[in-house]
Amino acid sequence: MVPGSFLGAVHRLAPLLILLSAFSPALAAEDPSLIVSRFQEYLRINTAQPNPNYSDTKEFILAQASSLSLEAQTVEFVAGKPVIILKWPGTNPSLPSIMFYSHTDVVPVEQSKWAHPPFGAHLDGDGRIFARGSQDMKCVGMQHIEAVRLLKQSGFEPVRSVYIVFSPDEEIGGHDGAEKLAESEIFRKMNVGVVLDEGLASPNEDYRPFYGERSPWWLVIKAIGAPGHGAKLYDNTALENLFKSIETIRRFRASQFDLVKAGLKAEGEVTSVNMAFLKAGTPSPTGFVMNLQPSEAEAGFDIRVPPTADPEVLERRIAEEWAPISRNMTYEFKQKATVHNKNGKPMLTATDSSNPWWGLMEEAVRKANGKLGKPEIFPAATDSRYFRLLGLPAIGFSPMANTPILLHDHNEFLHKDEYLKGIEVFGSIIKTYASYVEDSRDRSSRDEL
Ligand SMILES: [Zn+2]
């Protein structure tokens, strides 16, 4: 190492160390490289779907919990898929608790497209840590743990109980993880008042908070018509009818996309529609029969519906314009996630004064010298939906500023300084949330949040 680069590194870390020391004098004793090495250790466990190594994950997290004297419970709603629940008991257990949530699995990699091994957690000369899961979302899970470590070292005692939960299978829908947890008696007994789950990296200096997400509707429309000779012109063929629908759907898609292009709406605020498949034709040994108009044709669409949309209006549009019975068309949903929670309200977490957790979050991030951007709707699905479905407030938040969005991409990385800064931010959030006692409305008014 040349002296110049050493000085550069010290200079870069200096403000961070000062911030962290102000936050916790004990951190002076904690070497940042040790904190980073624990993150690397977690990243090196290959938890890529479809064969995530959950047993090493469990062992690693339980070892972290024991080093912090946290209560730990492992629940397997499905054998071999552990949900790990760590608890830091509060001094007033009657108050609703706070849950810091992350998933332990990651998406698969194309090994050859990576500059560094995706499960090597290589730290390069610039301070970037390369690994699958470095952004989505092992960073967040470890930051939750490290933030508790900092707070414990500083002597902080939570009033509300703090849960740190690690869950499997988010990347394949969360059905054996978050969904079963949210429906369980164990979760009910945790008496959770607010959930923090994943967000996205931010290319600028503002952190991005998410207060809702779009619901996937997977639609298949089908047209039936009289078959006929390929040379004959006649009305109501299956393919003609299907194409009328496809044209209508494409116009709707363009109208939504135009709103995004014009800057009037964010991606998460419009209904997106993309064609997933097109199926028609009469197969022959060499391809398709060319002089026959087929009697059936189908098309599939991936539709994403924002919680602000009226699902009844969209469904009427599908029935009347996209697959009208007048053109011999039918439709079915392969998946149709609800846009409303169990109380019939849009699955949105309030971002105004009706939700005290929102203001507290802004305050906590500010105290840690960070800044929250405008609340956004997550463009895809996360496990937050299972908790919002219950009417609970859930905020998607992964503190990664000045970072390109690389989730599910090749060469996913996070800079170590952003990682360390995120620990400080979570420390501030845990401290602020766990100290908050003025919420007298609690469970009875959750529906309003
Ligand atoms: Zn994720």
Image (cartoon, rainbow, N blue to C red):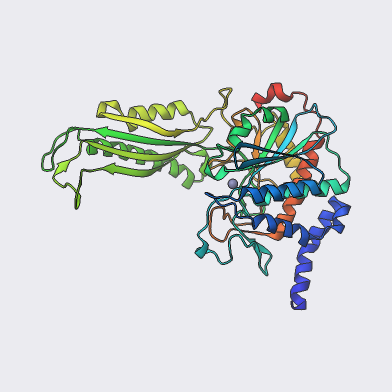
Residue 63 position (above or below residue 334): below
Whole-percent x and y of residue 393?
66, 32
* In the rendered image, the vertical position of residue 5 relative to residue 242, given as above or below: below
Residue drawn 64% across and 29% down? 184
Relative to 323, 398 lies left or right = right
Viewer can see residue 367 = no
> Residue 150: image x %, image y %?
82, 49
Q: Is residue 91 left or right of residue 324?
A: right
* Residue 180 occupies quadrant: top right
Instruction: Report whether 279 appears left or right of 295.
Output: right
Q: Which residue sits furthest front?
A: 79
Q: Is residue 446 above or below residue 413?
A: above
Residue 126 percent across, percent down from the top left: 67, 67
- Which residue is drawn at the image coordinates 47% and 42% (left, top)? 259
Residue in front for this viewpoint, 101 or 359: 101
Vertical position of residue 153 compared to residue 220: above or below: below
Residue found at the far bottom of this picture? 2
Q: Residue at x 81, y 60 (%)?
A: 31
**Residue 29 visible in the snapshot:** yes
From the viewer's side, name the closer residue of 294 and 247.
Answer: 294
Q: Quadrant of the N terminus?
A: bottom right
Closer to the camera in the image, 208 or 424: 424
Residue 45 location in percent, x, y? 64, 55
Across the whole image, how many numbered discs are drawn on residues? 0
User: On the rendered image, what quadrant is the C terminus found in?
Assistant: top right
